[in-house]
Amino acid sequence: MRTILVGYDETEPSKRALERAVSLAKAFDASLVVTSVAPTLQSAGGRGAGPIDPVDSPERHVEELERARAYVADQGVEADYVPAVGDPANTIMRVAEGATRT
């Protein structure tokens, strides 16, 4: 089975990406995974993850996923939702690797 992963943060481009992902999931009978990543601040020296960004909290990303869930459900598509914390690019890659193993 095919899996489509979309990173979602309620920006206009990510809303369009979610719409497209839903269309593709319907067209190709693919599973859909939606993730939203709360970024961490870089620690001194730029190595490793630091504390969670207080302006962009994990709770905010969970709320974003809930709104995405409502949209996707209205479209008649089932999806998995993965809230995450970390460097967005690396974390989305880890979610993608996990999604392709199931």
Image (cartoon, rainbow, N blue to C red):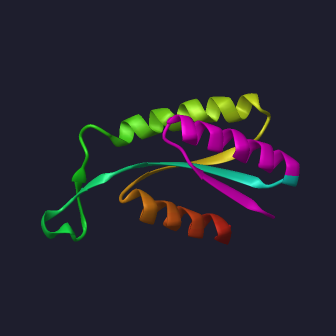
Question: Residue 6: x and y, percent?
Answer: 60, 51
Question: Residue 9: x and y, percent?
Answer: 48, 40
Q: Residue at x 43, y 40 (%)?
A: 61
Camera-side residue of 9 and 13: 13
Q: Is residue 20 left or right of residue 16?
A: right
Q: Is residue 17 left or right of residue 26?
A: left
Mark yes or no: residue 3 visible.
yes
Camera-side residue of 1 and 17: 17
Residue 45 sits above or below residue 35 on the image = below
Mark yes or no: residue 78 visible.
no
Residue 22 colored magenta?
Answer: yes
Q: Is residue 89 left or right of residue 79?
A: left
Q: Which residues are magenta?
A: 1-27
Q: Residue at x 23, y 40 (%)?
A: 54
Q: For residue 102, which quarter of the picture?
A: bottom right
Residue 6 colored magenta?
Answer: yes
Q: Residue at x 77, y 32 (%)?
A: 75
Q: Is residue 87 left or right of residue 14?
A: left
Q: Residue at x 66, y 68 (%)?
A: 100
Question: Residue 45: x and y, percent?
Answer: 14, 69
